[in-house]
Image (cartoon, grey):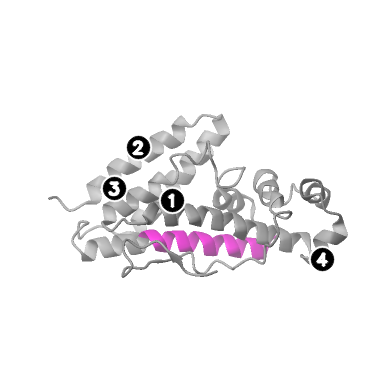
Amino acid sequence: MPSLEVAGSPNQTDQSFSDVKSPSYQGAYHRPSVALFNQQGYAGSSMSDVMRVTGLQKGGIYNHFRSKDELALEAFVFAVQRVQQLFVGALKGKRHAVDRLMAILSVYERFLEDPPVQGGCPLLNTAVESDDAHPALRKQTQIAMDAWRSLIERIVDKGVARGELQPTVDAATVATILIATIEGGIMLSKLYDDPSYLEQALTHLRTYIQQLATPS
């Protein structure tokens, strides 16, 4: 996957999610399976389900993918890239570390009502489902999560170096708190069909980020 531009200026580039495997996902007829896997899970989606949503026969699907597992892996990567595109747009033009961290939160403000992929956050869904039975999918999920963590950590480290964030701020801790709180808010909102849980999580994180800033 190519490096994504999420920089505050042409001279400032963050390499975001660059380790996520680039998919061979081609053709709009395959893309309905992305939502299928994200909604029903990989174990819960049969090849008959894939045929139903894509309108393809089994032979047509196997012309592009060697197995259901390969299709599921490609579908996950495609779903993650849709989320990445939201980060690119949100971070564009933001330079200050606080603004950039707030921009990450902004991606999730409409995540429930207008998700990039139907079914919610592909990272959360796949992280919960993936296990030793699907080692390639689990590995790809770890790579995607590591990339998200690295993006946040780079923003924090640069913010500390520039004096925008307090010198005691630990980048790894900030990444863990942001990701765990966001994903926890999404999980509770989906479980109870109530967006207020994610809204409360984001409100708390906005206050938390402001407290990281160097006093002016």
Amino acid on which the number 4 mark rests in the picture: Asn
Task: Say whether residue 132 is visible.
Answer: no
Residue at point 71%, 59% (across, down): 27
Q: Nearer the viewer, residue 80 or 203?
A: 80
Contact (Cβ within 8 Å) of mark 1 with mark 2: no
Amino acid on which the number 1 mark rests in the picture: Ile
Q: Label 3 belongs to which residue?
A: 209
Contact (Cβ within 8 Å) of mark 3 with mark 4: no
Amino acid on which the number 3 mark rests in the picture: Ile
Q: Label 4 belongs to which residue?
A: 63
- Mark 3: few/some/many CA within 10 Å (<14, 14-19, 20+): some
Question: Residue 188 at x, y = what percent?
Answer: 51, 36
C-alpha gap between disc 1 and disc 2: 14 Å
Amino acid on which the number 2 mark rests in the picture: Thr
Indicate which label's residue lies in the foreground, 4 or 2. Answer: 4
Residue 87: image quadrant is: bottom left
Numbered label attached to residue 203: 2
Q: Label 1 belongs to which residue?
A: 179
The magenta stretch is: 134-152
Judged by its main secondary structure, the magenta piece is helix
Secondary structure of the residue carrying numbered label 3: helix
- Mark 4: few/some/many CA within 10 Å (<14, 14-19, 20+): few
C-alpha gap between disc 3 and disc 4: 48 Å
C-alpha gap between disc 3 and disc 1: 13 Å
C-alpha gap between disc 1 and disc 4: 38 Å
Residue at point 34%, 54% (across, down): 174
Indicate which label's residue lies in the foreground, 1 or 4. Answer: 4
Q: Nearer the viewer, residue 4 or 197?
A: 4
Height in image: 17 above or below 127?
A: below
Numbered label attached to residue 97: none
